[in-house]
Amino acid sequence: MSNNKNISVEIALPHKALEAIDANKVVIPVQNGDSVTILDERAPTVFMLGAGLLQILNDNNKLIDQYFISSGICNYAEQKCTIAISNYADANITEEEAKKALEAAKVADEKDFYEAILSSIKLDKVNQYK
């Protein structure tokens, strides 16, 4: 039995709320390329987010949800994790879907975002064979 308390997680885009969920851990991609795990006992903190995988986990480290995000900010205080992101894609996006989104992208940031997703998908394929 876990002693972890729930963290209220809210994820939002500039124009709409994306998700509100309770979790035990949140793994966020920070700007320098590393990931940080948010647990309930963490001191209040603000993080600048970079491109990468945002993961929401339960107390058994089972994945509840995950997204590729482009950038954003994460504020954690008093068991509330508020994450504002500029763009996202479902973590189950296929290589074909990412290629189509890259072709449709109109601004450099959006193109960079989908190129990073394609790189991640290709890396996952390589790692499957190791």
Image (spheres, rainbow, N blue to C red):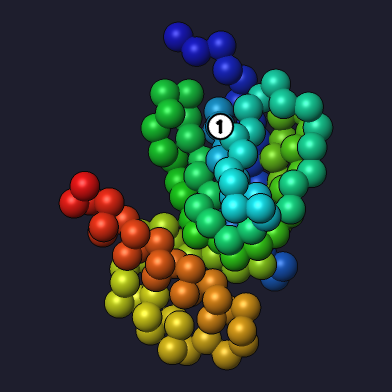
Q: Quadrant of residue 123 in the image?
A: bottom left
Question: What is the residue that sits farthest to the left in this orientation?
Answer: 129
Q: Which of 128 and 73 is in front in this view?
A: 128
* Side of 13 relative to 98 (left or right): right
- Determine the residue positioned at 50% across, 53% down: 53
Q: Residue at x 78, y 27 (%)?
A: 43
Tag 1, which secondary structure? strand
Q: How many numbered marks are there?
A: 1
Q: Is residue 91 above or below residue 47?
A: below
Quarter residue 93 falls in: bottom left
* Quadrant (top left, top right, bottom left, bottom right) of the N terminus: top left
* Crowd rating for badge 1 (residues with CA inside 10 Å; few <14, some 14–19, many 20+): many
| Residue 108 visible | yes
Does 79 sit above or below residue 127? above
Could one spot residue 11 in this view of the protein?
Answer: no
| Residue at 57% from the left image edge and 90% from the top image edge | 106
The answer to which quarter of the image holds residue 26 is: top right
Q: What amino acid type is highlighted by mark number 1?
A: Lys
What's the residue at 58%, 43% (across, down)? 35
Picture coordinates of residue 94, whole percent (x, y): 31, 68
From the top left corner, tell me how far across and down residue 51 is, in percent: 58, 61
> Foreground: 43 or 16?
43
Q: Where is residue 120 in the image (x, y as percent from the top left)?
A: 40, 61
Q: Residue beneath label 1, please? A: 25
Left or right of 89 on screen, residue 95: left
Residue 10 vs residue 104, the one in the foreground: 104
Compared across the picture, whether 49 is left or right of 89 comes to right
